[in-house]
Amino acid sequence: MKEFRIFYSVLVLFVFIMCFVYQSRMMPLLLLILILCPVFSFIVMLVNFLAVRLALSSGKPGDNAGGASLEIVAEKHEECGVKLYLQNRFLFPVSPIRIIGDFQSQHENETTFSKKILMTDIPPLSRSVVGLPFCLPFRGEYTIRIYEVCVYDLLKLFRLRRRLDMQARLIVLPRDKTPADRGKETEADTESPASVITSHRSNMFNSLREYREGDSIRNIHWKLTAKQDELVIKQPEQSLNNSAVIFNDFSAEFGENYLTRRMLDAVIETSLAVTKKILTDGNGVISCWHGARGSEKYELTEYAHYSYLFSAFTMLPQEPSAKDFGGLISLFSPEIKEYHTIYIITPDLSRELLHTLEESGLAMTDGVVAVTFTAAPPSSEIKEYIRNETKIKLLEINDESHYFNME
């Protein structure tokens, strides 16, 4: 913009000098035109500035553009986007128009939202659509913001700026993973995939009730269902011995930010999958983790509680917790030893963590399962120590697979 002003000033000065050098009637007329053109251009820009309208939309069917706030829910790696609608209600085109906001940036394996400038134009009496696509590899909450819009005049000598507060809130959900039985899937597995977490299942039933979403097909009372013409579920007897405790390590940090966020998602997705499977089998779960409100312990006794845990884990910060995972185990271990199975889901099975498990007595307790991931496996020395010196069962799973074995 600065260069246009300099060029135009030099041109006006040149014509002004020519008016004295050449005694021609055309030179004063040309000078007058050069003086009036910026005035006309400014007036057109002002009218365009008042006539331009902006709106956000997800682009999905039935989602009309409008408002300054938008919320979009998507899956990981799902190609979605936000559409910015720009409307020109005047006879002159708006060119160019500059939009400043936070848009998606891709740097190697890292996907972020950073401040960028978007240049476009709008034909007269029409509407333009600017697509802002995104495809995010990590769960969590993201925000696309638009800070301001600038309209320039035709000569690029002036601009008018409008401050904005438009934003689209993006919620990326964790993947729905499933503990599988050796990777096989049958007709029954479609609704409730089998796994070998049979230690949580109870064959004792003390009540009957109607079918609810999430109930295992194995618990259907087929004889009563045939008589009553509606699904009836055998309610398993709840006891502490059938329940499980899950310790979630959200504090592991690696040198590479991509791996850190990947492992954080792996802990969340694995924990949700195990929790869902245990609840589907009719047993209870106690989930422990370090959250924004401190050390949290949430008890799930029925499938309806799963939605709260899913929402809480989805909205967890994408940065590792600053609190030590060993402290979480030391805090809750005295009151959880009576439970049948204890899962410790961590991508960083270190010597310090093993020391904490030894001090708490969990290292020599039956039913303790340490779940880690092949992308960040423990050292061979630690594996050897766990196998020879503890009763801990070690499981390494592939965090990128939708199915994993719990055996």
Image: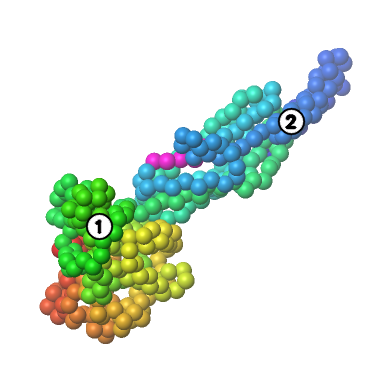
Q: x%, y% of residue 314?
A: 40, 58
Neighbor class of circle 2 (other Cα within 10 Å; few <14, some 14-19, many 20+) is: some
Is residue 239 depicted above or below 145 in this figure?
below
Mostly what secondary structure, the magenta segment? Answer: strand
Q: Residue furthest left?
A: 388
Q: Residue at x 64, y 40 (%)?
A: 149
Give the colour scheme of this rendering: rainbow
Give the camera-side residue of 94 and 310.
310
Badge 2 amino acid: Val
The part of the image, by quadrant, that contains residue 233 is bottom left
Neighbor class of circle 1 (other Cα within 10 Å; few <14, some 14-19, many 20+) is: many
Task: Look at mark 1 in the image and give the residue it sits on.
Answer: 233
Q: In the rendered image, which quarter contains the C terminus? A: bottom left
As for residue 65 lying within the magenta part, the answer is: no
Badge 1 amino acid: Ile
Q: Residue at x 65, y 29 (%)?
A: 88
Give the camera-side residue of 168 and 22.
168
Q: In the rendered image, which quarter contains the N terminus? A: top right
Task: Look at mark 2 in the image and give the residue it sits on.
Answer: 47
| SS label for mark 1 | strand
Dot 2 and dot 1 residues touching (CB under 8 Å)? no
- For marks 2 and 1 on the same chain, the one whose residue lies earlier in the sequence: 2
